[in-house]
Image (cartoon, rainbow, N blue to C red):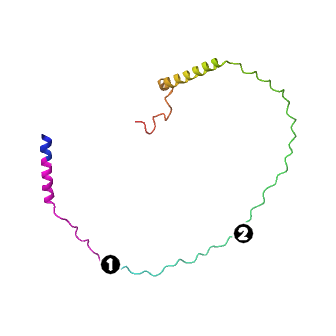
């Protein structure tokens, strides 16, 4: 009920306000007489008389005698590395079991890592929280 009364009163007052508004035009801007600045005589810089410098050449670079290094002995010969042992044979069931256990471990680490991150200092960042921390 209150909303209806308020709406009717508001609509009636809008027409009353619109009737009170008078047309408005801005007054003309003031005009000023033109400036009469005195003209200045033309200005030119005096000529620059820089002294000329004598020609310059770099002194010759020093020379050094050649280095006489002794020759090194030949490198020692090493025995050939042993041949690696062949990989142990696994059956397909063992490979499937290895894969399943691996992905279970990856999932467990991914699930429980957020629980242990505060113990290890969180996810890094600035020591005082840095900008952007609220």
Q: At x 48% / y 26%, what residue is drawn?
A: 114
Q: Is residue 58 left or right of residue 44?
A: right
Q: At x 13% / y 59%, what residue is drawn?
A: 19
> Against 45, is 79 above or below?
above
Q: Is residue 11 left or right of residue 104?
A: left
Circle 1 residues within 10 Å: few <14, some 14–19, many ≥20: few
Inspect the magenta stretch and tell me whether residue 10 lies in it. yes
Where residue 106 appears, as percent x and y from the top left, is 55, 24
Inspect the magenta stretch and tell me whether residue 64 lies in it. no
In what element is the residue under mark 1?
A: loop
In the displayed image of the protein, which residue is found farthest to the front?
Answer: 92
Q: At x 32% / y 78%, what residue is drawn?
A: 34
> Against 54, is 36 above or below?
below
Where residue 31 appears, as percent x and y from the top left, is 27, 75
Of marks 1 and 2, which one's residue comes earlier in the chain? Answer: 1
In what element is the residue under mark 2?
A: loop
Where residue 68 appears, as percent x and y from the top left, is 86, 45
Q: Nearer the viewer, residue 106 or 46?
A: 106
In the picture, the quarter occupied by the C terminus is top left
The residue wearing badge 1 is 34
The picture quadrant where one finds residue 37 is bottom left
The residue wearing badge 2 is 55
In the picture, the quarter occupied by the N terminus is top left
Where residue 3 appears, as percent x and y from the top left, is 15, 42
**Which stretch appears magenta?**
8-34
Q: Viewer-nearest of labels 1 and 2?
A: 1
The picture quadrant where one finds residue 30 is bottom left
Which label number is shown at residue 116? none
């Amino acid at each position: 009920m209150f909303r209806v009364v308020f709406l009717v009163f508001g609509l009636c007052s809008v027409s009353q306000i619109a009737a009170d508004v008078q047309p408005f035009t801005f007054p003309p801007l003031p005009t000023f007489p033109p400036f009469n600045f005195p003209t200045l005589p033309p200005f030119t810089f005096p000529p620059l008389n820089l002294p000329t410098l004598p020609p310059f050449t770099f002194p010759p670079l020093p020379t050094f005698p050649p280095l006489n290094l002794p020759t090194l002995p030949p490198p020692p010969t090493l025995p050939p590395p042993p041949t690696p042992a062949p990989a142990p044979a696994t059956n397909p069931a063992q490979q499937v079991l290895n894969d399943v256990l691996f992905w279970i471990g990856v999932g467990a680490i991914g699930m429980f890592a957020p629980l242990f991150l505060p113990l290890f200092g969180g996810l890094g960042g600035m020591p005082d929280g840095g900008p952007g921390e609220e």
